[in-house]
Image (tube, helix red, strand yellow):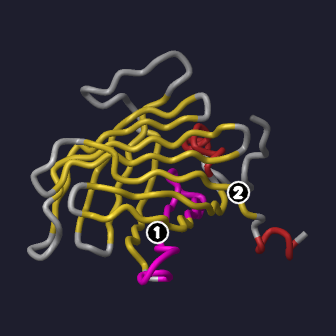
Amino acid sequence: MTFAFPEGLAPEVYPLAWLVGRWSGEGVLAYPGIEESRFRHDVSFDHDGGPYLRYAATMTLIEGADDGRIWQSETGYWRVAPQTPEGVELAEGQHPVEVLLADGAGVLTAYLGAVGNGRVDMASRFMAATESGPDMRGATRMYGNVEGRLLWAWDLSAFGNELQSYASAELLRLADAASSTES
């Protein structure tokens, strides 16, 4: 995987540098009690020079009566942990990763995991919801760079269900409009 480190990126997040940019693609979501639906997934990883990446993602339904309706939106921060958190096992070439995400439905999730070799695997350390937020008990996520595409999968334990597949998508990197106009 060949890429250039983004200008001004903090060295602490170099293991995550391959994620920086805008990504978009289609996926499918299905879960007990939720009708299977196709969605567009738009994701952005950027930085402001701090020792973390900023993250924003939106899932928009793309077919049927709900076409164009935003299904889920979240923002957060990704960072490489300065030391390996308890319970996280690293393979050769991996670094510990910590991710904090907040979504519009009222859920805050802290993930711990590993990044290395073009892949991120993480599991929720805790999830907290507002009084009106959904009943979510746990989650795992995987992000993988496969031939320049970002493959993404989210397993979820919610509404009394065991951990199982919730959503997945295949994303392509979009040209960064800001950097192309500055060049």
Q: Amino acid at mark 1?
A: Met
- Is residue 56 on the magenta stretch? yes
Span highlighted in magenta in the image:
43-68
Residue drawn at the location 17% of the way across and 56% of the way down: 136
Residue 27: image x %, image y %?
52, 57
Residue 100: image x %, image y %?
35, 55
On screen, residue 118 versus residue 158, left or right, reads right
Asked if labels 1 and 2 touch by Cβ distance under 8 angstroms, the answer is no
Q: Which residue is mark 1?
A: 59
On screen, residue 113 versus residue 116, left or right, reads left
Report how many numbered discs are placed on residues in the image: 2
Residue 173: image x %, image y %?
70, 57
Circle 1 packing at 10 Å, graded few (<14), some (14-19), many (20+), is many
Residue drawn at the location 67% of the way across and 46% of the way down: 149
Which image quarter is the C terminus in? bottom right
Residue drawn at the location 65% of the way across and 63% of the way down: 22
On residue 173, the disc is 2
Residue 118: image x %, image y %?
61, 34
